[in-house]
Image (cartoon, grey):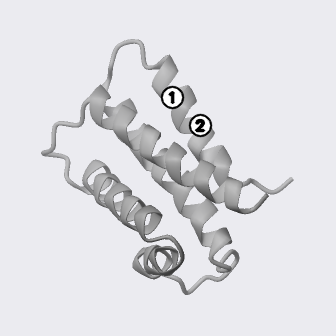
Protein backbone atom coordinates (compact mmCIF):
# COMPACT_ATOMS: atom_id res chain seq x y z
CA UNK A 1 0.00 0.00 0.00
CA UNK A 2 1.29 3.46 -0.86
CA UNK A 3 2.03 5.89 1.93
CA UNK A 4 -0.26 8.91 2.21
CA UNK A 5 1.03 12.38 3.00
CA UNK A 6 -0.97 12.62 6.19
CA UNK A 7 0.91 9.61 7.58
CA UNK A 8 4.07 11.75 7.88
CA UNK A 9 2.09 14.18 10.02
CA UNK A 10 0.67 11.36 12.14
CA UNK A 11 4.19 10.04 12.73
CA UNK A 12 5.27 13.47 13.97
CA UNK A 13 2.63 13.24 16.70
CA UNK A 14 3.77 9.77 17.70
CA UNK A 15 7.39 10.87 17.92
CA UNK A 16 6.34 13.88 19.98
CA UNK A 17 4.26 11.81 22.41
CA UNK A 18 7.00 9.22 22.90
CA UNK A 19 9.76 11.79 23.44
CA UNK A 20 9.65 11.50 27.22
CA UNK A 21 13.21 12.79 27.69
CA UNK A 22 12.56 15.89 25.56
CA UNK A 23 15.47 15.10 23.26
CA UNK A 24 16.18 17.83 20.74
CA UNK A 25 16.74 15.35 17.91
CA UNK A 26 13.15 14.15 18.38
CA UNK A 27 11.87 17.75 18.25
CA UNK A 28 13.75 18.17 14.96
CA UNK A 29 12.27 14.94 13.59
CA UNK A 30 8.75 16.03 14.63
CA UNK A 31 9.17 19.29 12.76
CA UNK A 32 10.45 17.49 9.67
CA UNK A 33 7.66 14.92 9.59
CA UNK A 34 4.90 17.47 10.34
CA UNK A 35 6.12 19.72 7.54
CA UNK A 36 6.31 16.88 5.03
CA UNK A 37 2.84 15.69 6.00
CA UNK A 38 1.39 19.14 5.29
CA UNK A 39 3.57 19.53 2.18
CA UNK A 40 2.38 16.27 0.60
CA UNK A 41 -1.27 16.99 1.38
CA UNK A 42 -0.87 20.45 -0.17
CA UNK A 43 1.00 19.05 -3.17
CA UNK A 44 -1.86 16.67 -3.87
CA UNK A 45 -4.45 19.41 -3.36
CA UNK A 46 -2.82 21.69 -5.94
CA UNK A 47 -2.63 18.86 -8.47
CA UNK A 48 1.09 18.18 -8.31
CA UNK A 49 1.11 14.75 -6.65
CA UNK A 50 3.52 12.45 -8.46
CA UNK A 51 5.23 15.28 -10.32
CA UNK A 52 8.96 15.06 -9.69
CA UNK A 53 10.14 18.47 -10.86
CA UNK A 54 8.24 20.56 -8.33
CA UNK A 55 10.10 22.59 -5.73
CA UNK A 56 8.88 23.35 -2.26
CA UNK A 57 8.56 27.02 -3.23
CA UNK A 58 6.42 26.13 -6.24
CA UNK A 59 4.02 24.02 -4.17
CA UNK A 60 3.81 26.74 -1.51
CA UNK A 61 3.08 29.38 -4.15
CA UNK A 62 0.43 27.23 -5.81
CA UNK A 63 -1.26 26.78 -2.43
CA UNK A 64 -1.06 30.55 -1.84
CA UNK A 65 -2.89 31.13 -5.13
CA UNK A 66 -5.78 29.01 -3.87
CA UNK A 67 -5.73 29.77 -0.14
CA UNK A 68 -3.35 32.58 0.78
CA UNK A 69 -3.34 31.97 4.52
CA UNK A 70 -2.58 28.26 4.16
CA UNK A 71 0.18 28.95 1.65
CA UNK A 72 1.75 31.43 4.03
CA UNK A 73 1.41 28.93 6.86
CA UNK A 74 3.09 26.20 4.80
CA UNK A 75 5.86 28.67 3.96
CA UNK A 76 6.47 29.28 7.66
CA UNK A 77 6.58 25.52 8.26
CA UNK A 78 9.15 25.21 5.49
CA UNK A 79 11.33 27.76 7.30
CA UNK A 80 10.99 25.83 10.58
CA UNK A 81 11.79 22.57 8.80
CA UNK A 82 14.81 24.03 7.06
CA UNK A 83 16.19 25.28 10.36
CA UNK A 84 15.52 21.98 12.12
CA UNK A 85 17.20 19.98 9.35
CA UNK A 86 20.13 22.18 8.38
CA UNK A 87 20.99 24.65 11.15
CA UNK A 88 22.34 22.50 13.95
CA UNK A 89 23.32 25.58 15.95
CA UNK A 90 19.63 26.36 16.55
CA UNK A 91 18.12 25.30 19.87
CA UNK A 92 14.96 23.45 18.83
CA UNK A 93 12.53 23.06 21.72
CA UNK A 94 9.46 21.04 22.56
CA UNK A 95 7.44 24.23 22.11
CA UNK A 96 8.82 24.65 18.57
CA UNK A 97 7.77 21.10 17.71
CA UNK A 98 4.30 21.65 19.17
CA UNK A 99 3.81 24.86 17.16
CA UNK A 100 4.76 23.15 13.92
CA UNK A 101 2.53 20.16 14.61
CA UNK A 102 -0.42 22.48 15.31
CA UNK A 103 0.20 24.53 12.15
CA UNK A 104 0.48 21.37 10.05
CA UNK A 105 -2.79 20.19 11.56
CA UNK A 106 -4.48 23.45 10.51
CA UNK A 107 -3.25 23.04 6.92
CA UNK A 108 -4.20 19.38 6.64
CA UNK A 109 -7.66 19.83 8.19
CA UNK A 110 -8.45 22.86 6.03
CA UNK A 111 -7.48 21.04 2.85
CA UNK A 112 -9.34 17.90 3.85
CA UNK A 113 -12.48 19.94 4.58
CA UNK A 114 -12.19 21.58 1.12
CA UNK A 115 -11.98 18.15 -0.51
CA UNK A 116 -15.22 16.90 1.07
Residue 22, position as x, y percentages in the image: 33, 19
Contact between marks 2 and 1 (CB within 8 A): the answer is yes
The answer to whether residue 56 is above or below residue 42 is below
Q: Residue furthest top?
A: 20
| Image side of residue 80 versus residue 91, left or right | right
Query: Who's the residue at 48% across and 81% down the image?
Result: 65
Q: Residue furthest bottom?
A: 53
| Image side of residue 24 versus residue 33, left or right | left
Place residue 91 in its image quadrant. Answer: top left
Residue 8, position as x, y percentages in the image: 60, 47
Looking at the rendered structure, the number of numbered marks drawn on it comes to: 2
The answer to whether residue 18 is above or below residue 45 is above
Q: Nearer the viewer, residue 12 or 24?
A: 12
Residue 108, position as x, y percentages in the image: 59, 52
Q: Residues within 10 Å of mark 2 (few under 14, many from 20)?
A: some
Residue 20, position as x, y percentages in the image: 41, 12
In whole angstroms, how far apart are the C-alphas of marks 2 and 1?
6 Å
Query: Who's the residue at 79% across and 58% down the image?
Result: 116
**Which residue is the site of mark 2?**
11
Query: Who's the residue at 58% across and 66% down the image?
Result: 42
Q: Of helix, strand and loop, which one carries label 2?
A: helix
Q: Residues within 10 Å of mark 1 (few under 14, many from 20)?
A: some
**Which residue is the site of mark 1?**
15
Q: Nearer the viewer, residue 74 or 116?
A: 116
Query: Who's the residue at 31% across and 27% down the image?
Result: 94
Q: Of helix, strand and loop, which one carries label 1?
A: helix
| Image side of residue 114 versus residue 116, left or right | left
Rendered image: mark on residue 65: none
The answer to whether residue 72 is above or below residue 64 is above
Amino acid sequence: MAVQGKEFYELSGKIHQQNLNAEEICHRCCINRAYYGAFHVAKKYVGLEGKKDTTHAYVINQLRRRMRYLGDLLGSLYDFRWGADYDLSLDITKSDAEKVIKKADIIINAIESKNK
